[in-house]
Amino acid sequence: MTSPTWKERGRRLAGPLVEALAATRLTPDAISYMGLALSLAAALSVVANQLLLALILLLFAGLLDVVDGELARRRAQASAGGAFLDSNLDRLSEAAVYTALIVLWLESAPHWWIGLALAALIGSLMVSYARARAEALGFDATGGWGQRPERLIIFYLALASGAAGYADIMAILIGVIAILAAGTFLTRFSLVRYQARQRGADEITLQP
């Protein structure tokens, strides 16, 4: 029996909240926008060096990110349009907090810390883009150790470390995100390239 993923654990924790929201008029899209608003508020808190507040806001944003999809499934309102909206808002949220961290570190942090944050930002976006583009072309590009739930958990730990005064540990954890994201992107890139070569070989074989 395999252990539950982070996403499955999140769904279980969000169960009571989903039950409560199902009795309201709030739509899944509205909850997605609320999550984005919390993420943007967290980004502003990071810029202001209010890392504990940023952590709390991001924890609530992460909860809403689980709730919107579960609520859509509960109400049988899940749709391609809703999934597209949620995915794009997730990318905006991620870009906002990493950009905020770069802005914070521009003033006094070592330059290589800024490089780590930039690498984490680029890697995170490329992981998502690789999967989206691969699936649009009919390939499979899932898996990897640096998916969004794992990156979020490490980012939470980074903010907690920074809020506690351990800035060096915070920078190291951001570096871990950058490494995991890069590794996941390269894994997906290689997987899709392999599938493309296999598809090409099959097409050649099938030609008369």
Image: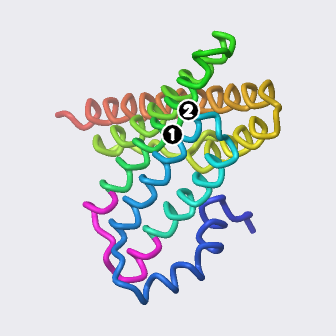
Which residue is located at x 53 percent, y 27 percent? 186
Q: Position of residue 203 (x, y in %)?
A: 26, 35
Q: Main secondary structure of the magenta part?
A: helix
Q: Quadrant of the N terminus?
A: bottom right
**Distance CA(mark 1)–CA(mark 2):** 5 Å
Which residue is located at x 69 percent, y 65 percent? 4
Residue type highlighted by circle 1: Leu
Q: Secondary structure at mark 2?
A: helix
Residue segment shown in magenta = 70-83
Q: Secondary structure at mark 1?
A: helix
Determine contact: label 1, label 2, CB under 8 Å: yes
**123 left or right of 89 in image:** right
Viewer-closest of 48 and 63: 48
The verdict on residue 76 being magenta is yes
The verdict on residue 73 being magenta is yes
The residue that disc 1 covers is: 44
The residue that disc 2 covers is: 47
**Residue 187 appears in which quarter of the rendering?**
top right
Q: Position of residue 161 (x, y in %)?
A: 78, 38
Residue type highlighted by circle 2: Val
**Residue 106 appears in which quarter of the rendering?**
top right
Residue most extreme to the left: 208
- Rendered view: 11 above or below 88: below
